Image: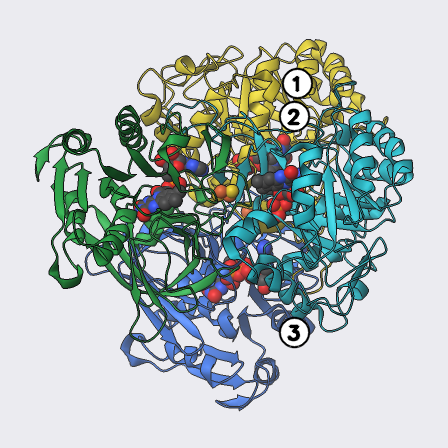
Chain colours: A yellow, B cyan, C green, D blue
Amino acid sequence: MTAQPAGPAEPPAAGAAPPVVLCGVQLSGPVLNGSGTFDAIAAHRAFGDELLERFPFAAFVSKTVTVEPRQGNPPPRLWEAPAGLINSIGLPNRGITGFLSHDLPRLAELPVPLVVSVMGFAREELALLVERVGEREEVALLELNVSCPNVETGLIMGADPAETAAAVERVRPLTEKPLIVKLTPNAVDPPAVAAAAEAAGADAIALINTLKGMALHPHTRDPWLGGVTGGVSGPAVRAVALQQVAAVAARTKVPLIGMGGIASGGDAVDFLAAGATCVAVGTESFRDPGAGRRIAAEMEVILGPQGANRAYRSGKGRPRSPAGL
Amino acid sequence: MTAQPAGPAEPPAAGAAPPVVLCGVQLSGPVLNGSGTFDAIAAHRAFGDELLERFPFAAFVSKTVTVEPRQGNPPPRLWEAPAGLINSIGLPNRGITGFLSHDLPRLAELPVPLVVSVMGFAREELALLVERVGEREEVALLELNVSCPNVETGLIMGADPAETAAAVERVRPLTEKPLIVKLTPNAVDPPAVAAAAEAAGADAIALINTLKGMALHPHTRDPWLGGVTGGVSGPAVRAVALQQVAAVAARTKVPLIGMGGIASGGDAVDFLAAGATCVAVGTESFRDPGAGRRIAAEMEVILGPQGANRAYRSGKGRPRSPAGL
Amino acid sequence: MAAEPRTLAPPERRMAEVSAKVRLGGYDLLVAHDIAGPPDPRPGQFYMLAAGERWGGGSGERPYLPRAFSFARVRRHPDGGTELAFLLEAVGPGTHRLGQLSPGDPLALVGPLGVGFRSPAAGTRALLVGGGIGVAPLLCLHDELSGTWHEGVEVLLGFRSSEYAQAADLFLAGLPGGASPLLAVMTDDGSVGRPGLVTEPLLEGLERDPAVTVYACGPPAMLEAVRALCAERSVRAQLALESGMACGFGACFGCVAPTREGYVRICVDGPVLDAELLETALLTGAGHS
Amino acid sequence: MAAEPRTLAPPERRMAEVSAKVRLGGYDLLVAHDIAGPPDPRPGQFYMLAAGERWGGGSGERPYLPRAFSFARVRRHPDGGTELAFLLEAVGPGTHRLGQLSPGDPLALVGPLGVGFRSPAAGTRALLVGGGIGVAPLLCLHDELSGTWHEGVEVLLGFRSSEYAQAADLFLAGLPGGASPLLAVMTDDGSVGRPGLVTEPLLEGLERDPAVTVYACGPPAMLEAVRALCAERSVRAQLALESGMACGFGACFGCVAPTREGYVRICVDGPVLDAELLETALLTGAGHS
Ligand SMILES: Cc1cc2nc3c(=O)[nH]c(=O)nc-3n(C[C@H](O)[C@H](O)[C@H](O)COP(=O)(O)OP(=O)(O)OC[C@H]3O[C@@H](n4cnc5c(N)ncnc54)[C@H](O)[C@@H]3O)c2cc1C
Ligand SMILES: Cc1cc2nc3c(=O)[nH]c(=O)nc-3n(C[C@H](O)[C@H](O)[C@H](O)COP(=O)(O)OP(=O)(O)OC[C@H]3O[C@@H](n4cnc5c(N)ncnc54)[C@H](O)[C@@H]3O)c2cc1C
Ligand SMILES: Cc1cc2nc3c(=O)[nH]c(=O)nc-3n(C[C@H](O)[C@H](O)[C@H](O)COP(=O)(O)O)c2cc1C
Ligand SMILES: Cc1cc2nc3c(=O)[nH]c(=O)nc-3n(C[C@H](O)[C@H](O)[C@H](O)COP(=O)(O)O)c2cc1C
Ligand code: FES
Ligand code: FES
């Protein structure tokens, strides 16, 4: 499957939600997965071809790929929080070469367009990743995960507008494919980062990534997670995510992919109302591998046949008082 | 009741937890209230003198006082979130003059030391507040709530190390009473802000305040809260709070007052293990006005008779790998 | 302040035990045995309730906070302690969960809270006006007024339909000495009593005899109509208001209503307010929108 | 991969209905009627379970995520669909909630998931070693092995005490043709069977006849002892591992165990792993600490 609009032979992927266009790529609905929260290759092992027949998402976002292979963090990697999850996975992946040779051909068999998420710990790493992923025709869009420190400056890329702009400017000329920048919520002013990314050439903004969090072992009181700290996701973060999406919508014009704790069609419609064009489902897929489809169907009931892309792209739910943001 | 160590005639306030010394002020236990989450005057109307006989906290922190009286935000002011609450109260208070004449004499009758929380929208406002509160002998400690914009610079004071340092430096000479700086969690680097506050003369750091969040009306999808956005509190934010406390503990030496979602003695002990000297209970008091006492009693069961101030002040639970922070 | 109709609450959450749960048309009547609470809550006061176990995990991962409920009836329990009856309408995850409780289940509560109804102004009769679930606090008020002086208490109740109007029967049952109140029932669909709004008989009553003190509880639109009718005629009215609440004891400042004197917290300054204090009873975010 | 003992699951959560919940000493036996799932999960596979209602609101505002459980027994339901039995030990808010379910309650499930046990190596007998709640997947394995070839399947089970050892009775009940297995029970306190650890009869058995394939499930310390005993004697062993899981189908990368080939996800590459793959079966964060 390539970046071309989905052909008529495509089975409808995410329920019967009306088509949505994201950066020129036509999607069968507004629901994507959050990067790193659905491994379509492993899920195919567990669910077989029924997964492809009832694929939960309208586009598939890969787990974040880095230049070098990574084992990820030592276990334990999970802690259940009130209405949420803390994870310290540590971006395990085969590295770009392994990804392109092993994973990409399999992901290309999915019935939906493909988004590849990449992370570089220096601008040149990011450039290499964007170049190598961008030249693959199986890939429809690229997502830059900027929730990591830049080893050159020591700053978290996505927390700083200038760092983010410099990263996007560096890679923008390297591909014609649409570039999504995925923001970290652990920033003073995510709208400023989003605006900087947009000015530097980002075609879309995705948010939020996980909130930084921690848990201790209930008896020893040592850090529970092998990686010491982790990222919080799930319904616990939804209110924070919704606020950030609304705030970013008020400062940018590019399409937004909103996520963070979405567990129902109602939640997803909130994100559209706040100004998002698409939504992504992460942790809820852990509770229900079919959550993406279910949520798309619930959205359709709420939005009616006119659908997602019309009623809400007006930004109806955008805060009336920008001062409040 | 004044800033002096609690005399022998004092009834034990928060269970039988062992005494804790916070900035030279002796407390009957480690559990305080979060500012703005317990109105002792209103609670006295509802519960009568039994409230004073079984006062839930070892010190009482006032709602934040500003220079001018404030009505607060239009309703609705509350939204229930998964395992949490979003509030948009808007700091209603009588203003400093009304507070000193009306509220302070009543609060002075509480059986525990008093902490007064103040917020200024400019450094000179903060100076005025610290001077006027600092000269009252009923007050044991002052807390600076820096979660607001400085109207002179446009920056959120508590999100920026330099802003915070400048504010603390301005007011530090104005009182000999201990100064607590209460951080906002909506910052890239709360430990840097804490370190700046400490260097500028803060005697203690309190954290976290609420996370910025938002909710929409389930039918109209307009912002639900009269104040458009609000602050998230309760168990949903606990993991974020614990991480920030651990990170601040790793960068500062002054005592910390940890809060954010504490609902049980086990939660509270986590915060001590992360490096806090005291904890504060906010939203859980809404579910149970006696939560402070209950949590202190549960802590004692976990910590044993040796108590809070010894076993955990070592920072046992502080992250082993500072890199992880 | 000493004179306000308020019974003090113990300063912590306690556990009561559900002794009965009866379906009453569209409502649930939940009866709980409260060992540690005071025996004499004042009509109009309320309790913050939560299931003693498994409060949470309902739709949208809620409820989390306790919910406010007027007590509808109180009596001494034969084994000591107090028996409290609450009338519930299931509108969301909290009321849904409370409606699932069975006898023997623990019920977490704080209360009684807030300020209840004051006695009728000198020389006036009590006229009680209730809409839907708003009849709950009027029931115990009626019990009290009927127990004190039988003459002249009049009750006007409005419901959506006969299903909900079953709650009106509570006003007939359990009356001391079998006294029968002056009771008029209205339904939107006319399936029981007269068709129409409860404000119609109120208007007729006020025209007939304005020497009344009106006690009203119900949806915001009804309360506002009552307020306006009474204001026009300078009739004293006490309105029991609602708002989303987090704490119920003045801690969160979340439950405010705008009044002529600024915002007041419904949970500590109300829920019963003098109608004169309000410019409107159409409060934002109150009631079941 | 085609040959791995794995039955595919429908790609979404579905609702089953609890048909029985029986207390079995220290455990609960939860039986559910699964209409839409496959009839033939492979022993060692597991399901992610959650109460169909009110999952959440337990201690610490949990559970939120579903919980992994090996199925312990499977049979066709007379009315169609599959009847799945799970053996549960209440250790926290999730297992506590599942233990509260009653017949008729909905049970949300995803599965069967993971890779089950493989057939014994050629020329070997099956030797099943279970500790505590770890007997669950061995029960269906035993059912299957006994159904296929009766001779020689041996079962060694260890429990804390007689209360828990009641689970051993399951291995005697429901056997096809009334066959009786070679069953040895050990308890820590000697209240039933022999006192001591289950690794003692394992050692004796291996010394007597090392031509076995060992199938083991239990606490990490037991699994590690089994692994070491087998490794020393070059005996093939298949270990059913545990780990905290968020998803159960490879989505979260949270359930990894370190192996000689790097981290593997217990939920997709396991839960049954060849013991040879492991340097240790003492996994961090696994089991009930
Ligand atoms: C003093 C007082 C006395 C009362 N007495 C009674 C009584 O006797 N009997 C009775 O049945 N009821 C009574 N109520 C109302 C009762 O408290 C509410 O119906 C109850 O709180 C609803 O809770 P829920 O979880 O069922 O519904 P919720 O989902 O909380 O919904 C109730 C309303 O709140 C809003 N809402 C929806 N979602 C949210 C959210 N996430 N956060 C905040 N608001 C939301 C909507 O307007 C919705 O219609 C009283 C209220 C007050 C203040
Ligand atoms: C493949 C597989 C098969 C299994 N089969 C069975 C079976 O057949 N029968 C059975 O009874 N059990 C089985 N288990 C174990 C079962 O999944 C756990 O006992 C269950 O998940 C515990 O959930 P809980 O909420 O009751 O306890 P939890 O509170 O989740 O506690 C379980 C353990 O997790 C840790 N823990 C505590 N708090 C947290 C937290 N907040 N977040 C993360 N971890 C925490 C602690 O180590 C604790 O001892 C199996 C597990 C796996 C992986
Ligand atoms: C286990 C786990 C792994 C994740 N891995 C990645 C990742 O590799 N790259 C990325 O950009 N985001 C990653 N995320 C963040 C999610 O894509 C998403 O932004 C976040 O979880 C919020 O959405 P949710 O609340 O719906 O899960 C991960 C989240 C989880 C829970
Ligand atoms: C309704 C409400 C009002 C609050 N008002 C204040 C305030 O006036 N000043 C302040 O410093 N913090 C205020 N806070 C923040 C709390 O003191 C506390 O930092 C926060 O709620 C986290 O703790 P919790 O999760 O235990 O509630 C308020 C919180 C709530 C929920
Ligand atoms: S409900 Fe908290 S102040 Fe009224
Ligand atoms: S439990 Fe999620 S990958 Fe195994």
Q: Which residue is mark 2?
A: A183
Q: Indicate whether C89 appears above or below B77.
A: below
User: Which chain letter goes with mark 3?
Assistant: D
Q: Indicate whether C228 appears above or below B139.
A: above
| Secondary structure beneath label 2 | loop
Q: Which residue is mark 1?
A: A194
Q: Three-letter amino acid code at disc 3? A: Ala
User: Where does residue D142 sit, x and y in percent of width and height?
Assistant: 41, 71
Q: Which residue shows up at 57% across the image and 33% down it?
A: B89
Q: Is the shortest distance between ligand 3 and the CB of mark 2 under 8 Å?
A: no
Q: Are marks 1 and 3 in contact (CB under 8 Å)?
A: no
Query: For the residues tagged 2 and 1, is the chain the same?
Result: yes
Q: Are marks 2 and 1 in contact (CB under 8 Å)?
A: yes
Q: Three-letter amino acid code at disc 2? A: Leu
Q: Which mark is residue D225?
A: 3
Between the residue at mark 2 and the residue at mark 3, the CA separation in whole angstroms equals 47 Å
| Secondary structure beneath label 1 | helix
Q: Three-letter amino acid code at disc 1? A: Ala
Q: Nearer the viewer, mark 1 or mark 3?
A: 1
Is residue C104 visible to the viewer in this orientation of the structure? yes
User: Which chain letter goes with mark 2?
Assistant: A
User: Where does residue B284 sit, x and y in percent of width and height?
Assistant: 56, 51
How crowded pointer 2 is (Cα within 10 Å; few <14, some 14-19, many 20+) is rated as many
User: Where does residue B120 sit, x and y in percent of width and height?
Assistant: 75, 29
Q: Nearer the viewer, residue D29 or D44?
A: D29
